[in-house]
Amino acid sequence: MGNALRNDYYISPDEYLTGEELSVDKHEYLNGVVYMMAGASAGHDRITMNISRHLGNQFSGKPCEAFSADTRVHVRTETAEFYYYPDVTVDCTGRANDSRYSESPRVIFEVLSPATERVDRGEKLQNYQRLASLEAYVLVDQARVAVTVYRKTAAGWESELLLEKGDVLALGCIECQLPLTAIYERTGL
């Protein structure tokens, strides 16, 4: 990391991880700068829980697991490090009970809000796509029925937009399907 990225507020990844273990609040780490995360709305939580529950039911007896927004994902590039808290992380590595973060997620879900949408569609999309293990990145709009899925293919990353409540989000990489009716259950959308 060059000195140009350092300032009076820079902390190392180890300092961040130590502080995060002691903190009541959650923070994301963006290459030396720490940002506190805001709380979520009831609609946001419903969508997150719906995704986790429906994935968890499909994972019974399989190696993949769905982890909540309390699980960090670590992204390391040649020049930077990031720790994010996705809304749902699918990890198939059999993470140890005491692991502090996932470095090999297969699928990541972010539920969009007006405050996070720009970052989720921009910076996080670019950084998550750098993860060799990642096969799908799913953005779920909490204000309307709209799911965008980015899938890794042999030709690169391709996107698909699902807008109908009758649509089904197919995630062949983890052998799961999520009907949008299940994702948006109890939201009134």
Image: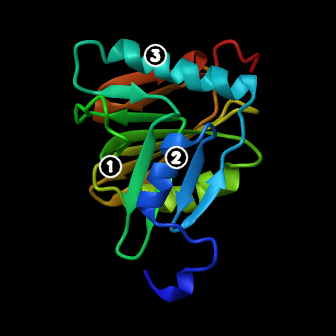
Label 1 sits on residue: 103
Residue 43 horizontal side relative to residue 123, left or right = right
Q: How packed is label 3: few (under 14 Cα within 10 Å), some, or many (20 or more)? A: some
The answer to whether residue 85 is seen in the rendering is: no
Cβ atoms at labels 3 and 1 below 8 Å apart: no
- Of residues 117 and 97, the one drawn nearer to the viewer in this rendering: 97
| Residue appearing at x 31%, y 33% in the figure | 98
Task: Name the quarter where the N terminus is drawn.
Answer: bottom left
* Percent position of residue 181, x then y: 59, 16
In the image, what residue type sits under mark 2? Glu
Q: Is residue 19 above or below residue 162?
A: below
Q: How packed is label 2: few (under 14 Cα within 10 Å), some, or many (20 or more)? A: some
| Residue appearing at x 43%, y 71% in the figure | 80
Cβ atoms at labels 1 and 2 below 8 Å apart: no
Q: Earlier in the sequence, mark 1 or mark 2?
A: 2
Give the secondary structure at mark 2. Answer: helix
Label 2 sits on residue: 20
In the image, what residue type sits under mark 1? Glu
In the image, what residue type sits under mark 3? His
- Of residues 4 and 44, the one drawn nearer to the viewer in this rendering: 4
Task: Name the quarter where the C terminus is drawn.
Answer: top right
Residue 172 horizontal side relative to residue 136, left or right = left
Cα–Cα span, label 3 and label 1: 23 Å
Q: Earlier in the sequence, mark 3 or mark 2?
A: 2
| Residue appearing at x 65%, y 20% in the figure | 46
Label 3 sits on residue: 54
Of badges 1 and 2, nearer the viewer stands 2
Residue 164 horizontal side relative to residue 39, left or right = left
Of badges 3 and 2, nearer the viewer stands 2
